[in-house]
Amino acid sequence: MTDMTVVDYIEQRIGKQAGYHSKRACRSQLTYRRFQTAAIILGALTPLLLAFNLLLVPPAKQFGQYVFTLMPIMAAVSLTVVQSFLSTYQYKDHWLESRATKEALDQELYLYRLGAGPYQSVANADALLVERCETIIGTERDSWVSAIKSSSQTTGAA
């Protein structure tokens, strides 16, 4: 038997996990939204720059013609890079998974503190809280490990 009480468990384990997942969700959401915004702007900018190139620059070889020719190419390359970051690092998935884990931990804690749901008629509510929270944390961890393994197999890494 350990000296850890349920209050210690709530503060040290659930509190830390909920805080971690909350921060990770916020960080992933912010990164995802920044990259998605850049992708939208670059995607919209590319045809616009091509149109400027066709409409505003006379066919004579001028410096402006080269600039307007390179700008849409750079926008298209940048868009490809941004979209690659979004698909490779899966910020949206991390954001949603972390938010779901944090919310599940919060819900479990509310049910426990109010003696509701599965905690209503159980002899040892403290042990049930630990089991259910560890299941939530373990499921998120297993999902993360699975994603890492899947990612390394598709990229050919060992």
Image (cartoon, rainbow, N blue to C red):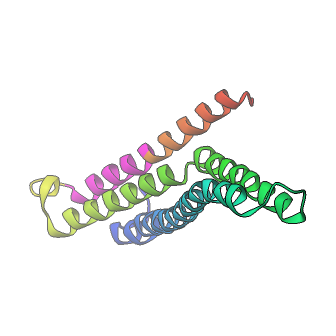
Q: Is residue 136 magenta?
A: yes
Q: Which residue is found at the position 29% from the left and 57% from the top?
A: 129
Q: Which residue is found at the position 49% from the left and 53% from the top?
A: 92
Which is nearer the eye, 1 or 57?
57
Residue 103 relative to residue 68: left or right = left
Which is nearer the eye, 21 or 48?
48
Q: Position of residue 59 (x, y in %)?
A: 82, 54
Q: Position of residue 67 (x, y in %)?
A: 82, 62
Q: Residue furthest left?
A: 121
Q: Which residues are magenta?
A: 124-139
Image quarter of residue 145: top right
Image quarter of residue 155: top right
Q: Which residue is found at the position 67% from the left and 47% from the top?
A: 80
Q: Position of residue 122 (x, y in %)?
A: 14, 53
Q: Is residue 106 magenta?
A: no
Specify the quadrant that holds the N terminus: bottom left
Residue 32 relative to residue 153: left or right = left
Q: Which residue is found at the position 26% from the left and 52% from the top?
A: 128
Q: Position of residue 149 (x, y in %)?
A: 61, 33
Image quarter of residue 110: bottom left
Helix, strand or loop for the magenta stretch, by majority: helix
Which is nearer the eye, 133 or 98?
98
